Amino acid sequence: MTKIDFGWHMPSFPVDGSSAQAFKTQIDATMEIVKDSMSSVWFDDHFWPWAKWQDPDTPYIEIVSTMAYYAGLYPKQKFVSSMYCQSYRSPGVLAKTVANLQWLTGGRVVFGFGAGWMEPEYKAFDYDFPKPAVRIAQMEEALHIIKLLWTQTPASFEGKYYRIENAYCNPKPDPIPPIMIGGGGEQLLLRAVAKYADWWNIPGGTGQNYQHKLEVLRGHCDAIGRNYDEIRKTYNCEAIAVARTEAEAKRISEASPFQNAPIYGTPQQVADQLNFFVNLGVDQFAVRLVDFPQPDGLQMFIEEVIPLVGK
């Protein structure tokens, strides 16, 4: 029997048009549901909604302050960035931020990191948006600096995009947080996963696509002599609809703002779909139920789907 961990992927904005205070009430109520049944909480790193159907003027959480706030309230969970965008903070500042969170939470941070993708957000907040190859190269330099700051005192590095000189980061994170890289680019991104990552994550997509990405990742690991099995495989279930009948789950899916959730059905059907990923090596899921802020789907998922996954 495989031990499977589940995390709740906290929505970054109210999907029902609620006010900021009502949205916080929704999050607080959901945290009370997941606090004893899911081992982690996952957070996006954006400044405004990424969904095209959402009003950009809607309330939106900021990752660092929100993570710190809920980590203080809920001492059992791990807190996962999914993913910090490498462009939005200098590598040195981000290294210090994550190290400090790791210290204050007693080692409950997973450092998810990505190359960045949301061009309108970059432009709105005055960040350069170079081509993907450059953003991935920047991500790799940033990871190098972050790891140096977590392990050396002082730390110096001169790169093409980033540099530090006699920089200090104390207290050092203990233990060093797992580094999770997110994305599925086959030539460069998955090669970076093979070089740097402890965990790998991809948001959404079919099981067949995930299986193909794993084959590519294994090839990159073989090319550099990395043990493929060292990398923890995680999957971000961005939209799940579960109900007593398949027809009801489909109705919930189609009625939600996300529409046509890729994973839906009865508890057994949803578990079967997740077990496809388990059979590929996934042992960590991050989940969103599409009927949020209603608790029904989440309660059913916890009580009836989780016990069937990994069995």
Image (spheres, helix red, strand yellow):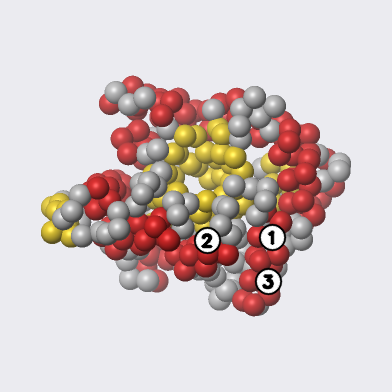
Q: Position of residue 278 (x, y in %)?
A: 60, 29
x 69%, y 33%: residue: 309
Inspect the image, locate mark 3, and give the three-letter code of the amino acid beneath it.
Thr
What residue would you read off at disc 3? 25
Q: Contact (CB < 8 A) between labels 3 and 2?
A: no
**Secondary element at tag 1:** helix
Total marks shown come to 3
- The image quadrant where one finds the C terminus is top right
Check disc 3 and report its element: helix, strand or loop.
helix
Give the distance between the C-alpha atoms of the residues marked 3 and 2, in whole angstroms: 17 Å
Q: Point out which mark residue 212 bears.
A: none
Which mark sits nearer the N-terminus, 1 or 3?
3
Contact (Cβ within 8 Å) of mark 2 with mark 1: no
Q: Nearer the viewer, residue 265 or 121?
A: 265
Instruction: Classify residue 48 as left or right of residue 294.
Output: left
Q: Residue at x 64, y 48 (%)?
A: 38
Sequence-earlier tag: 3 or 2: 3
Q: How far across and down, in percent of the image, does residue 216 sit?
A: 41, 28
Q: Residue at x 65, y 60 (%)?
A: 31
> Which residue is at the front of the view, 180 or 212?
180
Location of mark 2 (residue): 71
Amino acid bearing label 2: Ala
Q: Nearer the viewer, mark 3 or mark 2?
A: 2
Residue 248 place in picture, x, y as percent? 85, 47
Judging from the image, what secondary structure is the residue with disc 2 in?
Answer: helix
Disc number for residue 32: 1
- What is the distance, in whole Å, between disc 1 and disc 3 at their CAs? 11 Å
Please indicate whether residue 40 sits to the left or right of residue 85 in the image: right
Q: Give the side of residue 141 with respect to residue 37, left or right.
A: left
